Image: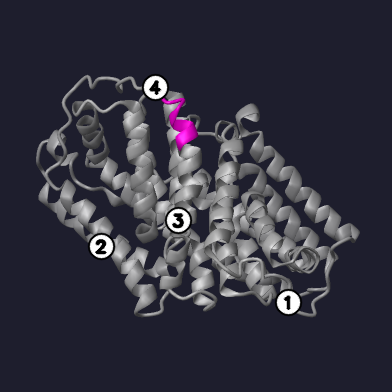
Amino acid sequence: MIATAAAGATSYVGTPVGYLALAIFVLAYGLVVLEDVLKMKKSKPVVFAAGLIWIVVAAGSSLGKEVNGKVMHHLAEFAALFMFLTVAMTYINAIAHQRVFLALNAWLVGKGFSLRTIFWATGVLAFWISPIADNMTTALVMGAVVITVGGSNVRFIATSCTSVVIAANAGGAFSPFGDITTLMVWEAEKVSTFTFLQLMLPCVVNWLVPAFLMSLTIPKEKPEPLKHQVVMTKDWWIVVLLFLATIATAVFFHMKLHLPPFLGMTTGLGYLLVFGYFQQTKYAGVKEEESDEATDVFKHIEDVEWDTLLFFFGVILCVGGLAELGFLAAASTGVYDQLGAFWANVLIGLLSAVIDNVPVMFAVLGMDPTMSVSQWLLVTLTAGVGGSLLAVGSAAGVALLGAAHGKYTFVKHLRWTPAIALGYGLSICVHALLQQHVFA
């Protein structure tokens, strides 16, 4: 959703101004990659870099007074994502407060499922839930289950979170509502609603191949036994239903009212706020252990992973600045002119793992290359699942980096990149076999 440089605008690619801005971005992203080594939260370098890049844009470009409007435009894109994420994370915190995830953990352990079985169960659920609930929200929900079940088993948590990210991204790629990029392609009327389903089999392959290889490293041992009985709060089911109603509201707002999905999410936050008010009134003056069951929405908002939200702010503003200097438009034009649609779309997926698939897809839509529906499906597939190659390549991965901080990291995800790349390549091959004109 981040705009590229406008048609006819001055490009600063290959100029000192462009090189300086690009160097700042590369340096900041390098610090993000070294998060485990430097012990520095991923938001810090990109937030600082965002300010520096826009200083370069303001001082070195010909935008003049227009630069303020450009910044506000990109800020609006972040604001929509910020509200969507904040509501989703608030609900996750509220559900966790109701001890739902602990109870699910107790059920899985009580049933005698092994860690490997739980690994597959969370992956399968993530794959099939994400087309409806979107990949980011799905990753947060299933990641919470993995973290709770895993306990102190960091290796299990890291591998399972990686699988959840791949599954959520793959599942979201064959639905208009599963990812921001699929939503963009759908809104641009490049692919119709049910045509997205043609990507289902390639998406299954994309997740299943690396998941199988990962599962071989997951022991068949049982999770750590629970030290105490877990009892959910009396009103847990109401909070879960309100969350489902919030997701449904977001979908309804977009499909029927043509309103942005984040507005549906914030409306759903209102459900929780009203429920929290009545709960606080209900438990007023009772014993502390009983009043603790009440939903304190603002406490749940306070516990949102701010490092993740600020990371998105930094990345979106950084890439927005580079877009105004002409980098995304130049990259998109050069790629399609030089490589042709098929290989360009394959490369788009690899690029989305580094830059983030949202601005990359917007650059493609902005260039509007002449392509068949098969090719638009291909770029939808590659941009959707290509982000799985790196932990910071998708909203699902970034969200889990915050939720499982220190247990699921960039480096721990990176060691599975070769297996993920194999699934990426095979999914493209499957799509090519299913589509007659994919090389057109």
Q: CA distance from mark 4 to mark 2?
A: 37 Å
Residue 399 seen in this snapshot: no
Q: According to the image, label 4 marks what residue?
A: 219
Q: Residues within 10 Å of mark 4 (few under 14, many from 20)?
A: few
Mark 4 and mark 1 lie on one chain; the one further toward the N terminus is 1
Check disc 3 and report its element: helix, strand or loop.
Answer: helix
Quickly name the residue at label 2: 245
Give the quarter of the figure containing the N terminus. Answer: bottom right
The alpha-carbon separation of the residues under discs 2 and 1 comes to 39 Å
Residue found at x 75% / y 56%: 53
Query: Gap in Å between the C-alphas at discs 3 and 1?
Result: 37 Å
Part of the protein shown in magenta: 212-219
Q: Is residue 28 above or below residue 258?
A: above
Q: Which residue does the numbered mark 3 point to in the structure image?
A: 201
Q: Which amino acid, mark 4?
A: Pro
Which is nearer the N-term, disc 3 or disc 1?
Answer: 1
Confirm whether the magenta stretch covers residue 214.
yes
Q: Position of residue 126 (x, y in %)?
A: 37, 47
Which is nearer the N-term, disc 3 or disc 2? 3
Quarter location, residue 291: top left
Which residue is label 1 attached to?
A: 6
State how far apart marks 4 and 3 are (Cα).
28 Å
User: Does the residue at mark 2 contact the one at mark 1 (Cβ under 8 Å)?
Assistant: no
Residue flagged by tag 2: what amino acid is it? Ala
Q: Position of residue 300 (x, y in %)?
A: 33, 47
Query: Which badge, 4 or 2, is on the more N-terminal residue?
Result: 4
Quarter holding residue 14: bottom right
Q: Label 2, secondary structure: give it.
A: helix
